Amino acid sequence: MPASLGALPLALIGGSALLAAPDGEAYWIGLVPVPDAEPTSVGAIATLRSGERIDLITGAAPADRPHRIAGTWHAIVGIPRGDGSWLALGGTRPVRALEFHTGRGVEPAGRVMVLGAPAFTALTGHRVAPLDESSGYGGWRLP
């Protein structure tokens, strides 16, 4: 797996979350617990640009109620393939939107629109910097 080149830009506009994901860029979703909050389960559904919806816990079409994972997971790394491997989010399977479910609710707790760099810049006024191949983790161990 290639090294991370840093976090992708995220903006909140009018109650909507927008994520800049340049074409061909793959990414994963970090899950960070809120300090002192009750543990909860999390589910996520991706809507691809093709319109296909995928439950990011099972890799299948979403059921009436999305599958959840326990609060011990730290990331959603991609689309599960059912054999222990996964396909990256973005890249060759461009994502149009993400929705997140928590607890027992059926309605999403949050939605994120995934935009290419030009659309993100047009809506937010913030330029998306080009990827810097030299900014990735270099393979050395941290102390």
Image (tube, rainbow, N blue to C red):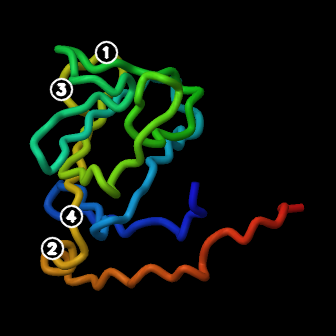
Per the image, the residue denoted by label 2 is 119
Q: Distance between the residues labelled 1 and 2?
A: 34 Å
Residue 82's place in the image compared with 108, above or below, is above
Per the image, the residue denoted by label 4 is 115
Q: Distance between the residues labelled 3 and 1?
A: 9 Å
Amino acid on which the number 2 mark rests in the picture: Ala
Per the image, the residue denoted by label 1 is 104
Q: Nearer the viewer, mark 1 or mark 4?
A: 4
The quadrant of the image that shows the N terminus is bottom right
Per the image, the residue denoted by label 3 is 107
- Look at the numbered disc 3 and give the secondary structure of its residue: loop
Mark 3 vs 2, N-terminal side: 3
* Pointers 2 and 4 in contact (C-beta within 8 Å): yes
Amino acid on which the number 3 mark rests in the picture: Glu
Q: Nearer the viewer, residue 50 or 32?
A: 50
Crowding near the residue tagged with mark 3, few <14, some 14–19, many ≥20 C-alpha atoms within 10 Å: few
Amino acid on which the number 4 mark rests in the picture: Leu
